[in-house]
Image (spheres, rainbow, N blue to C red):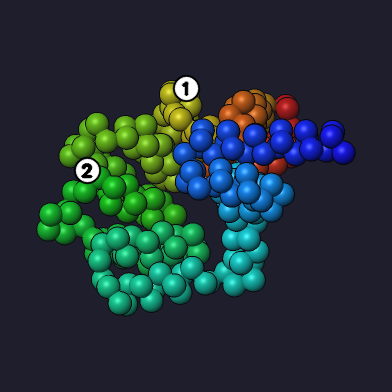
């Protein structure tokens, strides 16, 4: 019994220390002291777990299940929001859902509708339009918009502009120019997208040895990074999948 009491006190102390270090409301310390077992459990469920890695993983899993059951739910919700308020934010949100749903032509229209007046050369909107154009296969216009973006905002995410430029070049069949852009970009680009797209282009061109090396580097980079956000996790998964199928040479 004394051992159980001592263990209980240690657990209470750990939770109270967490309260003060995490900046949680101070009343939790009194609840934990007054109701040792129930207080600790309540504190964990209400304050600790919602911000934990496990909770984030659970939310991602729930979102994936929701999309699998009703893949058009987010698209419909964004369309309803736009019908209520035609703001630029709502148009952009719907455009992104359209791109994700494979109807990039609608995304192109929505982004174009945003680029007027004070927002005619907004860099975020220009980047969104280029992404939509690339997904729709309109590579010539995508190159024109990238040039417009660079001219108007040379310091706005230059590596992102280079990635879009490389994608447009590859889409137009200018593979040597695209490969040259990718070779320089992968050394400075933050994230896995540039490296993975470089590997996909090499694979498409039949350069399997080089593609395998690029995917291998991407997989190693993702391991070093540890926990990844959803988009990066998607590129890491792609790199691992391609490693399993692309021959070394």
Q: Position of residue 155 (x, y in %)?
A: 24, 31
Spatial separation of the CA atoms under disc 1 and disc 2: 25 Å
The residue positioned 69% from the left and 53% from the top of the image is 38
Left or right: 95 as drawn, with respect to 203: left
Foreground pick, 127 / 48:
48
Left or right: 83 as drawn, with respect to 244: left
**Residue position marked by numbered label 1 in the rendering:** 187
Q: Position of residue 14 (x, y in %)?
A: 65, 34
Q: Earlier in the sequence, mark 1 or mark 2?
A: 2
The residue positioned 71% from the left and 33% from the top of the image is 10
Residue 198 in view: no
Foreground pick, 96 / 241:
96
Quadrant of the image occupied by residue 118? bottom left
Q: Position of residue 125 (x, y in %)?
A: 28, 52
In the structure shown, which secondary structural element does the residue marked by tag 2 occupy? Answer: helix
- Position above or below: 203 against 248: below
Foreground pick, 204 / 94:
94
Quadrant of the image occupied by residue 226? top right
Task: Tell which tag, 1 or 2, sits nearer the viewer.
Answer: 1
Left or right: 147 as drawn, with respect to 223: left
Q: Residues within 10 Å of mark 1 (few under 14, many from 20)?
A: few
In the structure shown, which secondary structural element does the residue marked by tag 1 occupy? Answer: loop
Q: Residues within 10 Å of mark 2 (few under 14, many from 20)?
A: some
**Residue position marked by numbered label 2 in the rendering:** 148
């Amino acid at each position: 019994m004394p051992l159980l009491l001592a263990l209980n006190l240690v657990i209470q102390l750990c939770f109270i220390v967490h309260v003060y270090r995490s900046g949680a409301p101070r009343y939790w310390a009194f609840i934990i002291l007054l109701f040792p077992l129930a207080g600790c459990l309540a504190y964990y469920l209400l304050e600790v777990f919602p911000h934990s890695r496990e909770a984030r993983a659970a939310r991602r899993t729930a979102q994936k299940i929701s999309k699998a059951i009703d893949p058009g739910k987010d698209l419909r919700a964004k369309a309803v929001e736009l019908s209520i308020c035609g703001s630029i934010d709502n148009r952009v949100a719907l455009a992104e859902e359209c791109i994700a749903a494979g109807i990039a032509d609608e995304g192109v229209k929505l982004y174009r509708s945003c680029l007027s007046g004070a927002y005619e050369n907004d860099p975020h909107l220009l980047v969104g339009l280029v992404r939509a154009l690339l997904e729709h296969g309109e590579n010539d216009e995508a190159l024109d918009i990238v040039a417009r973006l660079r001219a108007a905002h040379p310091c706005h995410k230059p590596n992102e502009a280079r990635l879009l430029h490389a994608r447009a070049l590859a889409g137009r069949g200018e593979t040597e120019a695209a490969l040259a852009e990718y070779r320089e970009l992968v050394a400075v680009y933050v994230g896995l997208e540039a490296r993975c797209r470089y590997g996909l282009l090499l694979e498409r061109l039949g350069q399997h040895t080089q593609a395998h090396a690029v995917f291998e580097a991407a997989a190693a980079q993702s391991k070093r990074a540890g926990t990844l956000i959803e988009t990066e996790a998607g590129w890491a998964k792609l790199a691992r999948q391609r490693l399993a199928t692309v021959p070394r040479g």
